[in-house]
Amino acid sequence: MGRGNITIEDVAREAGVSRQTVSRVINRSPNVSGSARSRVEQAIETLGYVPNAAARRMGGARSYLLLAAIEGGTAGELAGRLPLDRMLLEGLAACSGQGYHLMFKQISQERDLASALTSLTPDGVVLLPPLDERAEFHHMLERRGLAAACLAERHEHGRVLPGLDEAGFGEAATAKLIEHGHRQVGFIAGDGDIVRSRRRIEGYRRALAEAGSRAHRHFVSEEPRDLAGAIDLARGWLAPTIRPTAIIAGTEAVALGVLQVAHELGLAVPRDLSLLALEDTSGLARSHPPISTLHQPLGALFAGACMRLIEAGEGGGAIRPQGTLTPAIASAAHVFMPRATIARAPRAV
């Protein structure tokens, strides 16, 4: 008998148990005796049986599939919002290690999500930014009895809400430069997500105001900037006598544009100008000098969201909704890569 023809009935006969017992072992149900579990596991090993999704659903009413819902858009737009390659790899590693499958699906409206839930029957859904802030999606999942997870949570007007803490991210980046004595800090948001940019700038302004700086009134831009746009803006900021001593760049393109202008104007980085980027890419690591970054580890946060859904289903049966599953702590919300573009602020500008 070829391995591809081995069925759950063959395993049951080999182990001397019922088909339902084999299914419970496959689904890690606690309602199986130790001796029966050992015989089933030995039979699976001997026969080379590979459980399929249908067999697994028999015992636990689970599909062993998690759905990652992402906002609709073109490939370029999606790449600009999230590091999907990194998230896919880390999410797959988390899911495959637990016997789960992972699927990404573009969702724009409620009917898109309803269709995906009906056709794919996932055990749980990870709502990726900015879908994690869409209350109607959370309500739909709750009505259908499906658990939802998001990458992080934020505090707004005294409430804890699902979603990345972008204001806190902007504040943390600014605080990193204030620690080095900088008060004239510029902020170029760079990406096309205006809501995200405004939240980060809110945190940036808060940090500078608390430090007694007025730079947030003069050296800030929330407009989308490509490389050429960043170069034009940086020339306007860095050429005058009164200029920022540090700049926060929202994207790789903005950071590289600022670095190019600094070289053109004879400003040494980081002696004359410190530079901090809000995403971490291979291009920033290879620049001259390598650019320091403070980034959100979205791959790790996504893997964590998948694991929260999987852990919610431990003990057998379907994954039960428990509200939106958010991290217990937010200690890994930001990761700092110091590299070579941050130094003490110059004494006079």
Image (tube, rainbow, N blue to C red):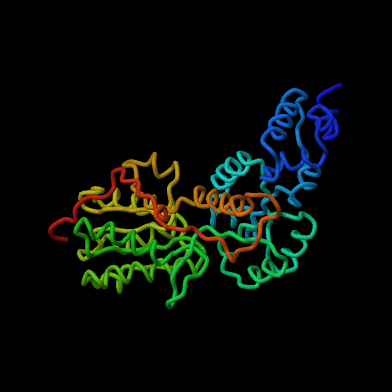
Q: Is residue 182 left or right of residue 97?
A: left
User: Does residue 86 appear left or right of residue 348 in this picture?
Assistant: right
Q: Residue furthest left?
A: 347
Q: Is residue 316 above or below residue 206?
A: above
Identify which residue, 335 or 228, lies in the foreground: 335
In the picture, measured across the screen, residue 182 lies left or right of residue 140, that is: left
x, y (%) of residue 286?
39, 39
Give residue 176's position: percent from left, percent from top: 28, 57
Q: Is residue 17 above or below residue 185?
A: above
In the rendered view, tell whether residue 321 sits above or below residue 14: below
**Front position in the image: 63 or 291:** 63
Q: Quadrant of residue 56?
A: top right
For image coordinates 52% across by 57% down, the residue present is 151
Q: Residue at x 19, y 59 (%)?
A: 181
User: At x 49% / y 68%, what residue is drawn?
Assistant: 194
Q: Is any part of residue 72 visible from this angle?
A: no
Residue 167 falls in image quadrant: bottom left
What residue do we see at 13% from left, 60% from top?
Answer: 348
Q: Position of residue 26 (x, y in %)?
A: 72, 39
Residue 138: which quarter of the image?
bottom right
Q: Quadrant of the C terminus?
A: bottom left
Residue 334 screen position, x and y as percent: 40, 54
Is residue 150 something that shows in the picture? yes
**Which of the image's four quarters has the N terminus?**
top right
Total number of numbered discs in the rendering: 0
